[in-house]
Amino acid sequence: MKAVIIDDEPRAINILEMVISEYCQGIEIIGTAGTINEGVEEIKKSKPDLIFLDIEMPDGSGFDVLTAFPERDFDVIFVTAYNHYALKAIKYSAADYILKPVDIEEVKSAMEKIKKRKTNSEGIFPDINELLLNIKAGAVRRIAVPSADGSEFIAVDDIMYIEADRSYCSIVLADDRKLMVSKSLSNIEELLPKDIFFRIHKSYLINLNCMKKYYRTDGGFVEMSDGKKLSIARNKKDEFMGFIGKWMGRV
């Protein structure tokens, strides 16, 4: 597998090259780049199977590199020192990433995931276009979810609650629509603001702004704006009451 490293820190490139050379058999670093433009040109020239892409760069974001390739035929492993919103969006898209300072086991794990995906999924990549949409939408508190004919932008304030259904989730909106998404509840939870969303149960994530009533009876449950009643897990009750207290102080 031929790879390119795009990072503005020469030392970071050197360390990653050494780790890959020592611990990742079958990976050949065929080029490096220190800027967005250099990265784009290196990919066009080298045609790699994989790129290691830094997110924060002086002349822009590593995501700018990806927008230059709407029809992508290479894998991406994001490399970042920042555990911020972008990382949540990366996790949501099921893309691969490693944090700086580079950890050997993280690099090996990311490479194994890519090799496994290539073997089992016939070259199917995580939806990077959806990832880019969520990165751009983050500032306005929207998320992009896949639909039958593309992606739909949803304002997080319009989400009443999300219900887990095995490997899928039902996103219930304020206009009574229900969207089925092939994401785990934990994936979606990572992307949503933690000031208004709370996981009351392994199967339910609720928007407190859409909570109509809290009941102490029958073990504890909440009634949402659409009349749906959702149980609160016993081990979540104390944390939930504390969260409500903080939430009440903000609204």
Image: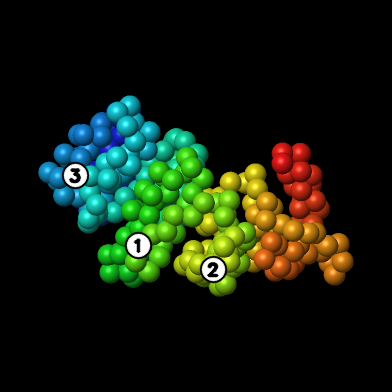
Q: Which residue is mark 3?
A: 43
Within-10-Å neighbours for mark 3: few <14, some 14–19, many 20+: many
> On the picture, is 146 further left or further right than 35?
right
Q: Residue furthest right?
A: 217
Amino acid type, residue under disc 2 in the picture = Lys
- Which of 225/248 is in front? 225
- Tell me residue 41's x, y (percent): 16, 39
Which residue is found at the position 38% from the left and 69% from the top? 148
Contact, mark 3 vs mark 2 (Cβ under 8 Å): no
> Can you say which quadrant of the picture contains the C terminus?
top right
Is 5 in front, or is 234? Answer: 234
Give the residue pinned by disc 2: 178
What is the x, y in percent for residue 197? 64, 51
Residue at the (70%, 69%) spot, across then down? 228
Disc 1 and disc 3 in contact, CB within 8 angstroms = no
Secondary structure of the residue carrying numbered label 1: strand
Disc 1 versus disc 3: distance between alpha carbons? 27 Å
Classify the position of the N terminus by image quarter: bottom left
Q: Tell me the CA gap for discs 3 and 2.
A: 40 Å
Structural distance between the alpha carbons of marks 2 and 1 = 17 Å
Tell me which amino acid carries mark 3: Ile
Q: CB atoms at circles 2 and 1 under 8 Å apart? A: no
Q: Is residue 141 visible in the rendered structure shown here?
A: yes
Say few, some or many: other residues with alpha carbon within 10 Å of mark 1 (under 14 / 14 to 19 / 20 or more): few
Q: Residue furthest left?
A: 45
Q: How is the image coloured?
A: rainbow
Q: Which residue is mark 1?
A: 150
At x 23%, y 44%, the residue is 68
* Mark 2 element type: strand
Q: Nearer the viewer, mark 1 or mark 3?
A: 1
Mark number for residue 174?
none
